[in-house]
Image (spheres, rainbow, N blue to C red):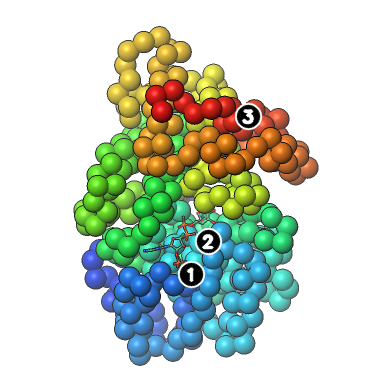
Amino acid sequence: MKNFIFQNPTKLIFGKGMIASLANEIPADKRIMITFGGGSVKANGVYTQVTEALKNHNTIEFWGIEPNPSIETLRKAVELGKMEKVDYLLAVGGGSVIDGTKLIAAGLLYDGDAWDLVLNSKLIAGAVPFATVLTLPATGSEMNSGAVISCKTTKEKYAFGYAFPVFSILDPEVTFSLPPRQVACGIADTFVHVVEQYMTVVGQSRLMDRWAEGILQTLVEIAPKIKENQTNYDLMADFMLSATMALNGFIAQGVSQDWATHMIGHELTALHGLTHGASLAIVYPGTLRVLKEKKGDKILQFGERVWGITEGSREQRIDSAIERTENFFRSLGLSTRLHEENIDNATIDEIERRFNERRMAYGENADVTGAVAKKILKSCLLSQPTGE
Ligand code: NZQ
Ligand code: ZN
């Protein structure tokens, strides 16, 4: 096990009816800006619950943080927040609203353009406190310090990190109104968060391996059931908690991390607007295909413990685990090949160029260079897997 420091200060408030606790969690003397996405919260009753809970607080609202939150939109929120002397933020929405709010929180205490903070988080001198009401299980943003911000003008998308929410409220009932595609993308995102912190080498931590495998097994068990019944409270509660546990730093304790799939996926989103989870469902099987020698021992463990694969040669078991993983994403209704999303060689070349220009190499061995990313994406160009 590697050395580590683990500290996660976010208070988790979980369960039915818990949005009402907002009234007690935010100090009464704060000038609060509540941030929202495009309006789903008005249709599903979350907006009413939030405004009812905060009816005696001093609030203003900022609407319109879009999926893959853009700096162009967030600059407007920072400007409004500064003008209104906001000293507390409450994000009500999915990962995009929460991530956007993380940037606003730092932007409020920064004199320059908030995009500087995305490019260089060392410039962040502080942030106003922020909390969240989560409406979409996927990113883990409700209990981590990361955020991913896009620039529409330049088609760029970067992750940065600096501060955790003070608290997050997770009521599984708010997920009942999610479009099925967002549920599928949320399950894929959660799955890939786990494997980015698991599918490296064997033997670093028995305990973290089993936590990770526990989340993966839970997702595999609940995914088909959720497809049948998305308004089952216990299923959605397990989904919601899985997503939070997958990326709150817990399962990363003492183990190597990968993240190459995410970095390639962000480029597919930046260049094509592909939803985050959908980008990962394509790239991840490709990452496994290309890196199966280096990751082989861990893929074998994963195959046996998550998919129950115990028969065949080493090579056959590895291939079978990769195929089962790709088929799992397909069972969610997601594409796993680039042509299904009309993405071709031109995009692959551009991603290779960007990785090379930034001199970046990702993965647990820092060996996923532009050339390797290209190989991974090329392997996703081929026609659909057999059995489809
Ligand atoms: O905008 P509204 O109208 O609210 O609709 C949203 C949006 O259109 C809708 N939605 C959310 N909750 C709903 C709902 N519709 C009905 N009922 C509900 N309860 O869903 C759509 C997508 O929302 P979004 O917030 O974009 O999805 P998600 O939570 O998947 O967030 C994606 C963003 O998070 C980043 C991604 O890159 C992407 O930009 N990530 C953030 C991470 C982090 N902070 O740690 C890690 C992740 O790997 C990821 O990169
Ligand atoms: Zn993700």
> Label 1: how many residues lie within 10 Å, few (<14), some (14-19) or many (20+)?
many
Q: Position of residue 329 (x, y in %)?
A: 41, 37
Any atom of ligand 1 within 8 Å of the CB at mark 1?
A: yes
State whether residue 359 is above or below residue 270: above
> Label 2: how many residues lie within 10 Å, few (<14), some (14-19) or many (20+)?
some
Which residue shows up at 23% across the image and 51% down it? Answer: 229
C-alpha gap between disc 3 and disc 2: 27 Å
Which residue shows up at 31% across the image and 50% down it? Answer: 239
Q: Front-most of 193 and 277? A: 277
Dot 3 corresponds to which residue?
378
Residue type marked 3: Lys
Dot 1 corresponds to which residue?
37
Any atom of ligand 1 within 8 Å of the CB at mark 2?
A: yes
Any atom of ligand 2 within 8 Å of the CB at mark 3?
A: no
Residue type marked 2: Pro
> Judging from the image, what secondary structure is the residue with disc 3 in?
helix
**3 or 2: tag closer to the N-terminus:** 2
> Judging from the image, what secondary structure is the residue with disc 2 in?
loop
Which residue shows up at 71% across the image and 39% down it? Answer: 346
**3 or 1: tag closer to the N-terminus:** 1
